[in-house]
Image (cartoon, grey):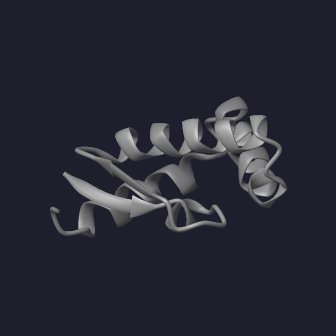
């Protein structure tokens, strides 16, 4: 299991996401950003908008996805 923060994934806070794969933490970040948006947390809005754009345009977002997977692979197991 590895740990990556909201900020590491482009968000504004240091909430830690834990997962066995990059996809696990990307999905956790998506849930976190959705919850922040629902709660009216404006500090997360820019990151939420970027995440929504990535989900809508996955081919355009492959660079971010590949970079995130590569960064995740270099993290130590926790």
Q: Which residue reaches farthest left? A: 77
Residue drawn at the location 62% of the way across and 46% of the way down: 61
Image quadrant in which you'd find residue 30: top right
In the rendered image, the vertical position of residue 34 relative to residue 13, given as above or below? above
Instruction: Give the percent coordinates (x, y) of residue 75.
Output: 25, 68
Near-viewer residue (34 or 64): 34
Residue 43 sits in quarter: bottom right
Residue lying furthest top: 56
Q: Position of residue 28 (x, y in %)?
A: 46, 40
Q: Is residue 31 above or below residue 75?
A: above
Relative depth, front residue between 33 and 21: 33
- Left or right: residue 5 compared with residue 71: right
Q: Residue furthest front?
A: 39
Total residue callouts: 0
> Quick check: 41 left or right of 24?
right
Give the vertical position of 68 relative to 7 (above or below): above
Residue at point 74% right, 55% down? 44
Residue 19: percent from left, percent from top? 29, 45
Q: Residue at x 38, y 40 (%)?
A: 23
Q: Which corner quadrant holds the C terminus?
A: bottom left
Q: Nearer the viewer, residue 77 or 37?
A: 37
24 relative position to 56: left or right: left
């Amino acid at each position: 299991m590895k740990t990556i923060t909201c900020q590491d994934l482009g968000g504004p806070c240091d909430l830690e996401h834990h997962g066995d794969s990059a996809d696990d933490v990307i999905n956790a970040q998506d849930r976190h950003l959705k919850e922040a948006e629902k709660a009216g947390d404006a500090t997360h809005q820019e990151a939420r908008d970027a995440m929504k754009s990535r989900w809508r345009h996955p081919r355009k977002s492959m660079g971010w996805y590949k970079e995130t997977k590569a960064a995740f692979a270099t993290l130590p197991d926790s």
